[in-house]
Structures are given as C-alpha cells and as structure tokens.
C-alpha cells in the first residue's frame, strides 16, 4: 500500500536553532497537508500545498512541495519552545483518503 | 461553538469487553474518520464515512465496527476481537472533498486492563 515516511523520527534542538522535517511518499500526491500535534493533544491543521514546486510561509515556518509531488518539507527558523510537538505530513492520492506520515517529534530546550 | 467532541477522554475496559467511543460534530461536515495512534507513531485509519448510512474500511478495520445513522455522529465500537486495543483514538471530520482539511476531536485514550 501507499506509504508516507518522515525523517527524522525525533529531533532535539536548542531554542534558536533551525529544524527541518522531510516527508516522502511512495506514490504521487494530489496535495499535501501538514499538521502539528502538541504533547497530549490532537493534530491541528497548519497548511496545504497543491502545486508542484509550491513554497508557502507562515511566519517562521516554510513549507515546500516537491517538483514530482512525492516529497515535501517543513523548515522552522529559529525554533521556540512553543514549537514543541509532533509534525505530520499527510497526502491525498486521489482515493478520498488522507494518508498520514509517520511524524517527526520535535523537542526544543530553552 | 463549532467543533468535534469525543467522549470519554479516558476509558478503561477489561479484556473481552466491547466498548463504544463517541464522536459528535456540529460543523455540518459530510465526512468523518476514525484513526488510531500508538505511542510515538503516526495515525492509522480505521474507518471512514463520506455520507450518512455509508462507511468504508480503512487500513486497520479488523476488530472495530462503526455506524453512521446521523450526519453529526460516527461512533466507533472496539470489539473483543481487537487483539491490541490499548491506544489513543482520534475522530476527525471534513467537508468531504478530495483536498479537505481534517478537523480532529480531542481524542479518547483507551486502556485495556
């Protein structure tokens, strides 16, 4: 079946350092979404990318969708303790199901 | 307030018992979903429903059952046939289109004793 993998599984950074998580799909995606789940909480939608090569920014967060629409990345500049959580990518393949990535857990030390 | 509610937040059950998790939404969304999340892992789709009185199996449907008698409600029953039911269960809803954002409820943490 279709798989969406994320690397790294876990990253621990010092506050102020940058962070990047990568998302790779075994099949082409019609679009990709990113979610954040705080510890003990539920996933919350961050952003959606649709076009090949698309780049979107939300303050310190930069999201990219690959040219082949099989990979994506989330980059956080100058992390803050409020960035702590697990970041999931999720993609649609055209079968009305969102396939979630394995997630990257981010820990930020002050 | 619009949103998705799940109850209870924590649930304990003995082995061999069936248990039903509640999910209600007042967002007027057509589609609803159930996911299972295990510690340190991603979300796996159990069942989904795109319209009332219809639902489809997800990737890990064995040992679970659902119903969708009302647009607002999508309860999940964890049966005794589910071999490893201890997990965090998340319900979500969306308007139903292919490019939809999914809105998640707060989750139910089920522990089998």
Image (spheres, coloured by chain):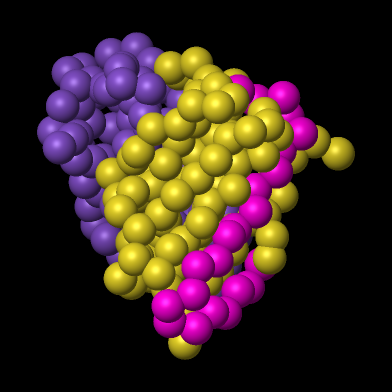
Chain colours: A purple, B yellow
Compared across the picture, whether B25 is left or right of B81 comes to right
Who is closer to the viewer here, A91 or A76? A91
Residue occupying the point 28% across, 13% down: A52
Query: Where does residue B24 sit, x and y in percent of width and height?
Result: 70, 43
Residue occupying the point 42% across, 73% down: B86
Please tell me whether residue B94 is drawn above or below residue A79 in the rendered image: above
Compared across the picture, whether B112 is left or right of A93 comes to right
Please tell me whether residue A101 is drawn above or below residue A2 in the rendered image: below
Who is closer to the viewer here, A21 or B32? B32
Who is closer to the viewer here, B108 or A82? B108
Compared across the picture, whether A35 is left or right of A44 comes to left
Residue occupying the point 21% across, 46% down: A5
Per the rendered image, the range of residues in magenta is B9-30
Q: Is residue B60 magenta?
A: no
Residue B38 image-quadrant placement: bottom left
Q: Quadrant of the N terminus of chain A?
A: top left
Q: Quadrant of the C terminus of chain A?
A: bottom right
Query: Where does residue B48 sit, x and y in percent of width and height?
Result: 45, 35
Residue A68 image-quadrant placement: top left
Please tell me whether residue A73 is drawn above or below residue B88 in the rendered image: above
**Number of numbered discs visible in the structure rendering:** 0
From where the camera sits, is residue A33 visible? yes
Q: Residue furthest top?
A: A51
Query: Where does residue B5 sit, x and y in percent of width and height?
Result: 71, 50
Q: Residue furthest bottom?
A: B113
From where the camera sits, is residue B104 visible? no
Q: Is residue B14 magenta?
A: yes
């Amino acid at each position: 079946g279709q798989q969406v993998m994320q690397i790294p599984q876990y990253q621990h950074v010092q506050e102020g350092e940058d962070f990047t998580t990568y998302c790779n799909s075994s099949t082409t995606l019609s679009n990709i979404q990113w979610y954040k789940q705080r510890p003990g909480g539920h996933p919350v939608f961050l952003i959606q990318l649709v076009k090949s090569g698309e780049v979107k920014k939300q303050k310190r967060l930069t999201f990219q969708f690959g040219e082949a629409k099989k990979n994506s990345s989330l980059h956080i500049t100058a992390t803050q303790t409020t960035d702590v959580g697990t970041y999931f990518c999720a993609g649609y393949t055209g079968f009305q199901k969102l396939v979630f990535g394995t997630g990257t857990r981010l820990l930020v030390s002050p | 307030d619009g949103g998705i509610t799940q109850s209870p937040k924590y649930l304990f059950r003995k082995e061999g018992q069936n248990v039903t998790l509640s999910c209600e939404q007042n967002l007027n969304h057509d589609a609803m979903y159930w996911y299972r999340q295990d510690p340190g892992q991603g979300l796996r789709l159990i069942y989904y429903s795109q319209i009332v009185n219809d639902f489809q199996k997800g990737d890990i449907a064995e040992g679970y059952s659902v119903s969708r008698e009302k647009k607002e409600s999508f309860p999940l029953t964890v049966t005794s046939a589910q071999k490893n039911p201890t997990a965090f269960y998340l319900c979500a809803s969306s308007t139903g289109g292919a490019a939809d954002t999914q809105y998640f409820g707060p989750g139910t943490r089920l522990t089998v004793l």
